[in-house]
Each structure stands twice: as C-alpha cells, then as structure tokens.
Amino acid sequence: MKGPTEPMEPTALAPAPLDRAAGYALLDELAGPQTATATLQGLDTLAPGFADWIVTALFGGTYQRPGLSLRDRQVANLAALTALGGVEPQLADHVRNSLRIGLTREEVTEVLVHLAPYVGVPKALAGLRVAAATFAAADDRAEEAHAADEPAANAQAVAGGAATGGAAE
C-alpha cells in the first residue's frame, strides 16, 4: 500500500488562461449588449458574483480555447442543451446566439433533428419546439421593428415628394 502522495504543484499543469474582458466582449457579440446586460444584472441581483464567474470562466476561458470555431461551439451547445433537457431558456438563448453569428434556421433545425437517434425523439422534439418558438419571437420582433420604421419612412417619402414638387419618385 502506498503512503500519502505529495500534493501536485500547480506549475506541473498547463495554465488555463481566463480573459475577463474577452469574455464580456464575446458575450456581447453572441447575445448583444442589451440582452447580456439585462440577463447578467438579474442574475447578479440573485447570486452576486455568479454572473461574472460565468462570463469569465465560460466566455473568457472555455470559449477562448483554440480548436473550435465559434460556430462549432454553438452547434455543440445546441446539442448539449437539447440532450440535457429541462434547460429551455438556455437553449432558446443559444438558438438566438446561433442565428446571430450566422447559422441559418435550417442549420439549427437540422442539428436538433440529427440528435433524435442519439438523445431520443422526445428531447429532439422538445428542442425543436424551443427553436420554433425562438424563430417566431424573432419574426415578431422584426415585424414590430418594421412597423415602427414605417411612419418614419412614410414621413421621409412625403418630405421627399414635397421637396421635388410633389412628385414622389
């Protein structure tokens, strides 16, 4: 039987750099500054310091590692969260993030369909429901933004018509 072992020296392991500023910059890129701020402030009110730890360790650490593109990391996140189940808010966030960085709705959908034989049809269907709801919410926001822009566009058209002698071009 061996005796007690010597404690491992931290210098025996490769350092795991954490870049807090890079973490916050990446979160802003993925989720958008307003969403990131609102989410983080709410979490920090409930559990002070936890939001900063998540951003620093995850987005400033794990996401900063070489070897996978941001797109590939999002595909992995979609798969992992769908496989876990019961994490619909986080899955919806990552569906939005995936779209924001350039994945198409079809690609997000195919990731979730592809999971069915591996995680089970019920979890794949649950993931698809989250994606469908997230897509619909994005469409609603786009329609609201378009409706809000219409009065300004109409006013510009009227002003332009008045400036050209009443004939809108």
Image: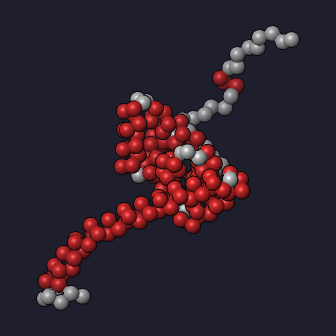
**Residue 106 in view, yes or no:** yes
Q: Position of residue 102 (x, y in %)?
A: 52, 62
- Out of 66 and 166, give the one closest to the viewer: 166
Of the 4 image quadrants, the one containing the N terminus is top right
- Out of 107 and 121, give the one closest to the viewer: 121
Q: Position of residue 155 (x, y in %)?
A: 18, 75
Furthest-top residue in this view: 3
Residue at point 54% right, 45% down? 87
Q: Would you say 139 lies left or right of 164 here?
A: right
Residue at point 66% right, 32% down? 14
Q: Position of residue 147 (x, y in %)?
A: 29, 69
- Out of 9 and 30, give the one closest to the viewer: 30
Q: Would you say 156 lies left or right of 100 here?
A: left
Color theme of the render: secondary structure
In terms of image quadrants, where is residue 159? bottom left
Q: Would you say 101 lies left or right of 77 here?
A: left
Residue at point 22% right, 71% down? 152
In terms of image quadrants, where is residue 9? top right
User: In the figure, 43 relative to 98: above or below?
Assistant: above
Of the 4 image quadrants, the one containing the C terminus is bottom left
Q: How many tags in the picture?
A: 0
User: In the figure, 86 relative to 144: above or below?
Assistant: above
Furthest-right residue in this view: 1
Residue at point 38% right, 64% down? 140
- Out of 126 and 34, give the one closest to the viewer: 126
Q: Position of residue 79 (x, y in %)?
A: 62, 52
**Residue 19 in view, yes or no:** no
User: In the figure, 105 relative to 168: above or below?
Assistant: above
